[in-house]
Image (spheres, grey):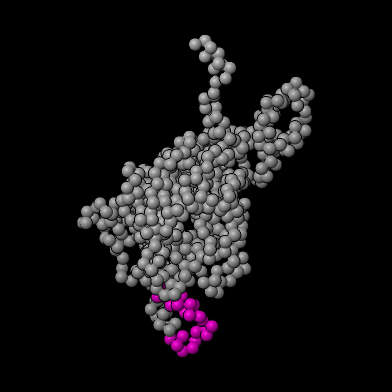
Amino acid sequence: MAAGGPLLPDCVLFEIFLYLDHADVLAVGLVCRQWRAVARDEFLWKELFYRYYRVSRDVPRHPAAVSWYDEFQRLYDTIPCIEVQALKEHSDQVLHLSFSHSGCLFASCSKDCTVKIWSNELDISLQHSSNMRPYNWSYTQFSQFNSDDSLLLVSGVFVGPHNSSSGEIAVISMENFTLLSRVRNKPYDVFGCWLNETNLISGNLHRIGRITSCSVLWLNNAFQGIESENVNVVKRLFKIQNLNASTIRTVMVADCSRYDSPDLLLDYEEQLAASSTSTCPVFDLGSDSEEEESKPKQTPEPAVQELPDDRAMPAEDELQQFFDGFMGGCVRPAMTEAELENKVAELFIRNRTKPPEVNLLSADSNSKTKYLIFTTGCLTYSPHQIGIKRILPHQMTTAGPVLGEERRSDEFFDSLDHVIDIHGHIIGMGLSPDHRYLYVNSRAWPWDCVISDPMQPPPIAEEIDLHVFDLKTMKEVKRALRAHRAYTPNEECFFIFLDVSRDFVASGAEDRHGYIWDRHYNICLAKLQHDNVVNSVAFSPVEQELLLTASDDATIKVWRSPRTVRIQQARKPRPRKLLFSWLMNQKS
């Protein structure tokens, strides 16, 4: 269509648009004199949007969008899908990436046993590298900046006596990159996390039987080597019984204070109610703002398990009755050694467990509290449940009794306040920026599977499901996001880190790609290619149009949006023409 060509009927123009890609649709405006008429035609762009992106018709427009044309442009122009830099300073698999809260720095962990600190400028550069091999580490696996970016938590695998593997956490000062303290962490895939600016959470595991154990979560002061001997630097937070070979892993902390003012509501009905009761803020969808919620998932809600408060019989009497029945031959003879161990452990802890805190969903819950979130299980060793435990304000410091809050002698264990059953192997978790939503990567079990041996979990699917849970209602919202895949079996399954920005969620995969989805529309927007497994992704916390991906190919790739690339190219000084340079030289 030339600039002076004939006008086409809207229906014909619409059908032409459907066969164009994003760039062509937007570029038509440069040559089509009909563009000014259709660019603001909401009906045309709404139809184009739904058909082009294959979005369900019952999904409303993003609440912060001003038009369907702007939404179409946003989903093309602001996705970080253009590779602008490849960082190859690591010599082995890169396992994890984490940004500082300011977005000025990021850290990377690797099988080469280093943690590297990078300066996030227009051209990203290496600022510092710490080698952890002198401390008997095998590799570094996870890192996290504290809230004021003054300290970096680094988690790794530690080689102990007789080549036994455990975990260890190191705290590094960002002022001079010195090592401040080291904390043992068992098992190593607890990873560890910050609770506040100066206190971090680690784990320990005590074996009780072949398939029963006890996980202890500790609060540690980051300055253990500096504090006075008279000041507590460690305190026990929780002690939790594990059954059927399960353990607590992958701990993280969610702050409840922002639940009532989320960035993006994912439940469409709640979103509509919020917009009808107050003026909905309009965000610049091309920059970093906050998001809203989408429609609840149509699949059955995940099972929630809570410890009952009343008992029909004291645990000691029930345990004695069980033993009497077992010795008298009244217990079914098919009970295996593992089943017997599990049954005895269940009866033993029945009245030796501190009851759960008040209902997490209660309206009077303290907004200053935080949730400790972790993977766990009850049927097998593979993590298939999410445990949630409330951390009260008085528990957020190492001051006070070394072993934590005083408890009765018969309250030996802590119960979980909430449990979400995933029915599959959990391989990744991440929180939305407002901590309202928890995103979970899992590989599903067959729906009809029966677990008879905790050491033989069910086979897991190759397709990864990305679930979304509302931590305010403790319910699953939306349908699971799909596109990415994994191939390793249960015993070799590893963590794939995901990340969430205001508008997008991204994840790695074993299929040599990273993936980006839109949180509101629940659609996959981009595949980011590597030469091997993509282990971790990270959005800049201040610029969601910048994404990093880390891979087993020992490379960190930097991805920016088409809009950002155009802006940066426009800012670069253009070289002077050779003729102009020659003329200037002649004049001089």
Q: Residue at x 57, y 55 (%)?
A: 510
Relative image position of residue 511 (x, y in whole percent): 60, 53
The answer, for residue 452, to whether it is visible in the render is yes
Q: Is residue 583 magenta?
A: no
Relative image position of residue 99 (x, y in whole percent): 44, 44
Relative image position of residue 168 (x, y in whole percent): 38, 58
The answer, for residue 263, to whether it is visible in the render is no
Please state if 309 lies on the left or on the right of 574 as rendered. Answer: left
Question: Overall secondary structure of the magenta stretch?
Answer: helix
Looking at the image, the residue that sits furthest to the bottom is 328
Q: Residue at x 26, y 60 (%)?
A: 401
Q: Residue at x 59, y 57 (%)?
A: 486
Quarter occupied by residue 416: bottom left
The one nearer the camera, 391 or 165, is: 165
Relative image position of residue 321 (x, y in whole percent): 43, 83
Q: Residue at x 39, y 58 (%)?
A: 137
Q: Is residue 329 magenta?
A: yes
